[in-house]
Amino acid sequence: MDAPIRVGLMEDGAVDPHSERQRRLIAAASRALAAMHAGEDEGALDGVADAVRSSPHSHTDARELMLLLFRECSTMVSALGSGGTTPVRMQVYDDEGQEVPIDEADPPVRTAVRTLLAEVHGDTDAARAHIEIALTNAAPDEMATLMVQALRWTIRLSAECINRGLPVADWITDALS
């Protein structure tokens, strides 16, 4: 008789480097959300930048951090669309508050919208590609705008989900409480 195969669980002390990395990314995102929620936009960006710079995989971690936020936004958009009373509508506004077509929006905003839409439609590869293109080609201030957009959407969507009694990831509610 073969011995049963034992899979180590985190409670058993097994170490999964991907889980450790995920914890670091969630911790960085949580700190950024908390800072932005408190009105400290620069502090949020500085914290993210410090967390990413301190990683030996800084480019990858920057991409994965933004994808984490957009993935959570996607989950909340989906919950609002199927479980909410009002459909979710994506709108882009210019500096004067006028709605503009996505192709006329500033590049970081276009990237944010396209990344979120890719995630909402289950195309994580396309979402990753949008972020990768931005990381490769965008100026630092454009990347900051993209990160701010992801953080603001996470805050706004989580508030709307909570107001409607829809689920929000624990780490997000913890960061915003």
Image: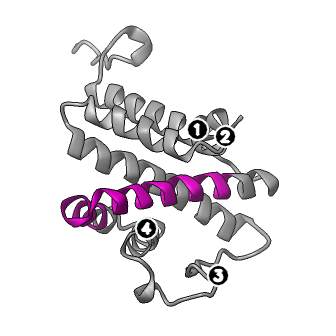
Task: Name which residue type carries label 4.
Answer: Ala
Question: Tag on residue 38?
Answer: 2
Reading the image, the residue beneath label 3 is 97
Give the distance between the C-alpha atoms of the residues marked 2 and 1, in whole angstroms.
5 Å
Q: Are marks 2 and 1 in contact (CB under 8 Å)?
A: yes
Main secondary structure found in the magenta portion: helix
Give the distance between the C-alpha atoms of the residues marked 2 and 3, in whole angstroms.
24 Å
Task: Name which residue type carries label 1.
Answer: Ala
Between disc 2 and disc 3, whose residue precedes?
A: 2
Between disc 4 and disc 3, whose residue precedes?
A: 3
Can you say whether 19 is above or below 85 in the image? above
User: Residue drawn 39% across and 18% down?
Assistant: 9
Name the element at disc 1.
helix
> What is the span of residues highlighted in magenta in the rendered image?
129-158
Reading the image, the residue beneath label 4 is 112
User: Residue drawn 50% across and 60% down?
Assistant: 149
Q: Nearer the viewer, mark 1 or mark 4?
A: 1
Reading the image, the residue beneath label 1 is 35
